[in-house]
Each structure stands twice: as C-alpha cells, then as structure tokens.
Image (cartoon, rainbow, N blue to C red):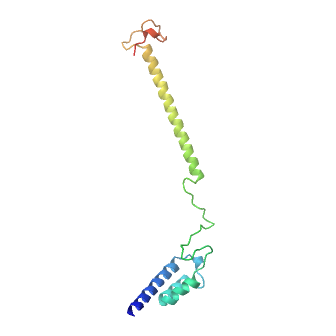
C-alpha cells in the first residue's frame, strides 16, 4: 500500500511540474480566466487540483492541435517569415552578380595572359637569342618555315 501512495505522490508532483512549466512558458494570449501569476500560485498551492484545472480551463486550445502532440508555433503577422538563404531572392541575385563579376575578371585575366604570351612568342620568333638579325628575314617580317628549328 505504501508503494501505491509513493507512486501517486510522484505522479502528482510530475503533473504539477508539467503544469507549472506549461503555465510559465505559455504566451500571454494563450492563458484564459486568470493571469499567469494566479495560475502559478494555484498550481503551487493545490498541485493536483491546480494542475488539472490548468490543463482543462487555463490554457486556450488551438485548432489543429493533436492530443499529446507538440504545439506548432505560427509566425505572427507583423513579423515577416525569415527565409533561408537559398530562398531569399536578394541573396540569390547577389550570388549571381558576384559570380558574373568573378567570371568577367577571370576572362579578362586570361585574355591578358594570352596577349602577353602571343607577344612573347612573336618577340622570340623575330629576335634570335644571340641578338643578331634572323637569317633570311627583314625587320618586322616573321621567319620562314625553313628557318624555324625542328622540334
């Protein structure tokens, strides 16, 4: 018999703790009949009756709330719903713009490198390594095929 009393006492304490947590974490618009402070005092001074009263009459029932399920909070109308970065159009636009700028910069550097290499190649073809005039060519004229070294 003592075990039954201990079990009922523990169940009453657990119910009171759950009711107190529910009361203190409820939003102001979800509390009915009494202010939050009043419900907390009732739950503390009369744990069994206060807890049952809180769950039956103290909190407002939401439509679509499953019994025993966790409540799903809906965003308030005055706050805009936060978007994930991949859903935010401004963020996506900035990513596309940055990508386009990076691509243009890379393309510009490639073109500069290509021009520099072409100029170096032309300079090497027209200027021999010893500084003399290439055989059979006039200044500014590219070397003939037979003048090019075999590779």
User: Among all residues in the image, which is located at the extreme left?
Assistant: 130
Q: Position of residue 20 (x, y in %)?
A: 49, 82
Q: Position of residue 23 (x, y in %)?
A: 52, 80
Q: Residue at x 44, y 17 (%)?
A: 123
* Residue 19 drawn above or below residue 147: below
Front residue of 93/132: it is: 93
Q: Could you say which quadrant of the image residue 7 lies in?
A: bottom left
Q: Position of residue 47 (x, y in %)?
A: 48, 88
Q: Residue at x 45, y 24 (%)?
A: 117
Q: Position of residue 78 (x, y in %)?
A: 62, 66
User: Among all residues in the image, which is located at the extreme front?
Assistant: 1
User: Among all residues in the image, which is located at the extreme top?
Assistant: 136
Quadrant where the N terminus sits is bottom left
Horizontal side, residue 27 vs residue 124: left or right: right
* Residue 72 drawn above or below residue 128: below
Q: Residue at x 42, y 14 (%)?
A: 127
Horizontal side, residue 128 vs residue 101: left or right: left
User: Among all residues in the image, which is located at the extreme bottom?
Assistant: 1
* Residue 80 drawn above or below residue 127: below
Quadrant where the C terminus sits is top left
Asked if residue 38 can be seen in this view, the reply is no
Q: Residue at x 46, y 87 (%)?
A: 12
Front residue of 36/64: it is: 64
* Residue 59 drawn above or below residue 117: below
């Amino acid at each position: 018999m003592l075990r039954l009393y201990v079990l009922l006492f523990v169940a009453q304490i657990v119910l009171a703790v759950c009711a107190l947590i529910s009361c203190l974490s409820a939003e102001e618009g979800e509390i009915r009949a009494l202010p939050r402070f009043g419900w907390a005092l009732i739950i503390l001074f009369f744990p069994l009756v206060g807890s049952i009263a809180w769950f039956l009459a103290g909190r407002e029932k939401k439509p679509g709330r499953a019994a025993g399920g966790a409540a799903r909070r809906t965003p308030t109308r005055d706050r805009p719903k936060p978007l994930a970065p991949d859903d935010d159009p401004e963020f996506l636009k900035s990513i596309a713009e940055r990508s386009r700028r990076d691509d243009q910069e890379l393309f510009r550097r490639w073109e500069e490198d290509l021009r520099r290499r072409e100029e170096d190649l032309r300079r090497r073809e027209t200027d021999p390594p010893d500084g003399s005039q290439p055989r059979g060519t006039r200044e500014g004229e590219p070397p003939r095929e037979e003048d090019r070294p075999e590779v």
